[in-house]
Amino acid sequence: MKPMKILILSANTGSGHNSTARAIGEQLTKMNIEYEIADTLSFISERVSDFISWGHSYVYRKLPKLFGIGYCFEEKHPPRFLYKQCARGAEALHAKLEAEPFDAVICVHVFSGMMMTEVRNRYQNRIPLYFVSTDYTCSPGVSEISADGYFIPHRMLLGEFVRNGAIAADKLFATGIPVASSFCETEDQGEARRVLGLPEEGKIVLLSCGSMGAGKLEKSARMLPRYLPEDATLVVLCGLNEKLYEQLKPYENEHLRIIGFTEQISTYMSTADLYITKPGGLTTSEAIAKRLPMIFINAVPGCELRNFEFLISNGVAGGAKKWKQVALMMQKSFRDPTIFAQQVEVMKSFVTHNAAEQICRHIVSDLRKQ
């Protein structure tokens, strides 16, 4: 049997999709399957990829209401314009598939799913295609994707994907969102704190708004410690937002730690008693895998609002739309430990730990039947 090789198509619109791609790649490596991760937008051009990546980051951080308006419009109208733009990269992507012996394509972004759909339609290319949803909702554009299998975050979303994505139920598989194996491993809290130089005693609260550092974190980071127990430490993860890091660093003290970009997110989660974050699909899935209680701040409208609503309604997290409400919720939860304990119990049965494994084994099984 010849070795398999799989192409994973992501998009540089934030780190979540790329993290999902790497989590799938990590599992393929364990299965001795070769893979390659590519940025879908680069098949249009590197300039387009850089521009869209920059534009997405700018609008997401600076104009969140506009981001939400655009998302809501796409929810109500077929995203023909986006499909047309993605189709511009079909020729280059088809050429890559013709030149290299890939056995299947896995798409972890709507853009890549639409581009691959155009490749299959335009060139009659029948390479097996799979789509992995990275939010707890059927995002706009999924209805434009024609795949052989769709892996979605939760079984309770099956009906939504059938209705909004026009997908046959037998092509939908509720696996969860793939996360790196490090988030599924139990790490001693005390050891994690020692590794990162954080206090071994007292509560630790992580504050983050994703890799781009979206939301009004500066004032919030200085306000939240007033609502924490006296021995608690607030650790602010600024991600790629260097301006935020520079703004907050002068206020750092023994109860407020300011961290720039880090690849040790899993270890930071292991140190914490609570995670205050925006409800990104990948971020929340990592915290669920860690069994880390969460309070959401509804920082950016759009798919994250759908995540916010779905996860809170199912008891996975708390959340509020105002920072003062978040602070009071945090304060109340530390006074009543049963609130966090209930969240953790829900997390244990909410999703499985092995989404990447389930996805990869399903795809490999499909390919071996052909």
Image (spheres, rainbow, N blue to C red):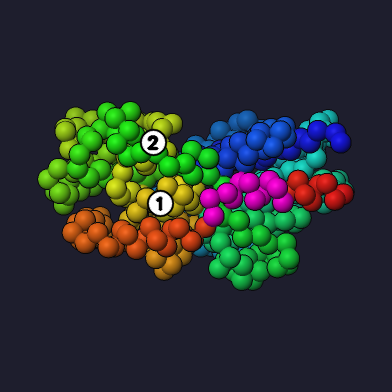
Q: Quadrant of residue 234?
A: top left
Would residue 355 be counted in the magenta stretch? yes
For mark 2, give the secondary structure. Answer: helix
293 displayed left or right of 348: left
Amino acid type, label 1: Arg
Tell me which label, 2 or 1, sits earlier in the chain.
2
Q: Is residue 161 above or below residue 236?
A: below
For mark 1, give the secondary structure. Answer: loop
The quarter in which the N terminus is drawn is top right
Chain part drawn in magenta: 352-362
Q: Can residue 58 be seen from the camera position used here?
A: no
276 displayed left or right of 57: left
In the rendered image, which residue does mark 1 sit on?
Answer: 291
Cα–Cα span, label 2 and label 1:
13 Å
Instruction: Residue at 18%, 59% (x, y): give it.
Output: 335
Q: Nearer the viewer, residue 231 or 36?
A: 231
Q: Can residue 30 be seen from the camera position used here?
A: yes
Instruction: Residue at 46%, 65% (x, y): give it.
Output: 310
Instruction: Residue at 20%, 48% (x, y): give it.
Output: 224
Q: Tell me the number on the disc at residue 267.
A: 2
